[in-house]
Image: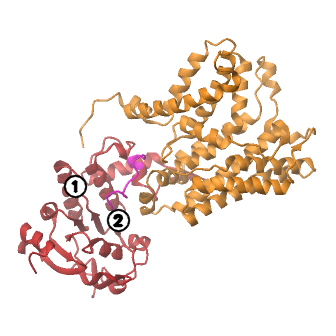
Amino acid sequence: MTRRVAAPKPRLRSWLESPVAGPLITFLLIFFLLSFVPNFLTMRSVSGIVNAATLTGMITVGITLLMIAGEFDLSAGALMAVGAFLYGGLTMNGSPPLVALLMALIIPGLLGAFNGLLLVWTGIPSFIVTLGTQFIYRGALWVYSGGIMLQTVQQIPIYDVFNGRMDFIADLIKDANFRTALLWLLGVVFLFQYILTRTRFGNHVFAIGGNPGAAKAQGVNVNRTKVICFIISGVLSGFAGVLLFSQYKTAKIATGAGEELKAIASAVVGGALLTGGEGSIVGALIGVMLISMLRTGIILLNLPFIPADNFEAVVGVTIVGAAILNNWIRSRA
Amino acid sequence: MSGNGTDTPVVHMEKIVKRFGTITALNQVDFTVNRQEIVGLLGDNGAGKSTLIKVLTGVYPPTSGKIYFEGKLVNITSPRIARALGIETCYQDLALVPHMSITRNFFLGRELTRHLGPIHWLDLHQMDKESRDALRNIGIHIRSPREKVGKLSGGERQSIAIGRAQYFGAKLLILDEPTSALSVGETHKVLTYTLAAKERGLSVIFITHNVGHVYQVADRFVILRHGELVGSYPKEEVTEKDIASLITGERER
């Protein structure tokens, strides 16, 4: 086994092999191109891009974890609405903020557990299970809320804790309108990057996605690990709902619709494989930011054939392009 | 079965019967593996080789029959129990996770961790060192323990699975078609590691279709046909050609 293949230098090669390499290269490339667009390199645009990405970013963490484990969670958007309703409703009627927060995390977490248990009990693919449960959860939400929209003008301090303006930054740097949700997102990203790459549980997540048979043969509890991933995705979706309500102070049954697909796209742009076994939380964060950056870039470009409300076409091209580029970079490594 | 001396077989399976509904997959099969012995388990498709192994490793419960491990009657009801006894199986496709590094595969399910209070983390440095040393000790040299298993050749993967089983204290190693998809050179390596495992005191069950490969390393051949034991033949008593004709039934016993 002393055979050596002519290849790039070992360090560069191992870096290119990492799932973050492709997304980062794509991100920098597009950032470079967009930097020529007027008004793109301003604090106003940059902070706008970041703020627009935080809510999707939060559910992308859980979705990426599940995709590495080889599963999908299409109910994430619905669970975001459930979290937003519980948190919003409870804070508005004067419940202690901590109770509201816990309910908005625990209930979506339990619904996530239900997704996972349905998967392991019935053996039906999670894509189908959660395709169904997302409608069940929105239906339950309709029953719970009576179908009305939730809205408030109250200003409770906890809203600022989760998604308030960080005026001290805007005071230092003109137009840098970052919000506190960014700090929560970065905390969650680094926590889960650590859990995935540095803990026994993370090792098992990669193993059950990469080769479930091998994981089982080595004594990994495949089903338990999957259910835990679904619980995490549920809790993070609920938390995304908390961040959403804290910012907009409104929630409706359709809140968060389509977010799960954006999150899957971000995870794929960020280097996750649809077949499982590979991906990265930091890569997914880059993916979310890339899509948000592109959206702002397109709006600023004001192209004749692509008005701002048709930017999704460009995002679609990027998703496919990034997936191809990621594959290419990995195959060259 | 008495005592625990060196003449006690590692495994002795007695009159094993396994029925699936009306089909008899194994009929009164006796099977023994002695200490530091490589046994070639041979038979055509459907002869009952893998059923016998699945009974031994706790995947299927036998309909009737007894299993002795190191002289003691045991009831192997799950793969976990087989493993705790020291029976390790290296399946062709189910051995390793291709997207993960050699180290992470080596310690999968048995990761080394360090902790500070309730916070645990993987001791990757120690695991890298131990997996590299363990593989080197049995003559397997790897470029880097962080290399992904998917980048390795089939023979290299087999050898890592064998090395892992040895490192974690296996007494009986079951190799399921270890050479079936390998080139000549790679096959040679896997056969070398199989012999090395025996030198280190392990017993090996080598399941294969390929008489040529197993003939180079096995001490004894056990042949099954249609779920029944054809016989057990020490290497001195049979040629490759004899074995081939016993498998197909051209020749009776």
Q: Report the Cα–Cα distance between label 1 and label 2.
A: 19 Å
On residue A307, which mark appears? none
Magenta highlight on residue A127: no
**Res B243 quadrant in image:** bottom left
The magenta stretch spans which residues?
B91-103
In the picture, one chain is red; tell me its letter.
B
Considering only vertical position in the picture, is B7 above or below A277? below
State left or right for residue B210 relative to residue B82.
left
SS assignment at label 1: helix
- Provide the residue designation for mark 2: B169
Give neighbour class at mark 1: few <14, some 14-19, many 20+ (Cα, 10 Å): many
The residue at the point 17 percent across, 48 percent down is B185
Q: Colour of chain A?
A: orange
The residue at the point 23 percent across, 57 percent down is B180
Residue A232 percent coordinates (x, y): 65, 52
Q: Main secondary structure of the magenta part?
A: loop
Considering only vertical position in the picture, is A47 above or below B139? above
Amino acid type, residue under disc 2 in the picture: Gly
- Provide the residue designation for mark 1: B190
The residue at the point 26 percent across, 55 percent down is B138
SS assignment at label 2: loop
Q: Is residue B46 or residue A189 the one in the foreground?
A: B46
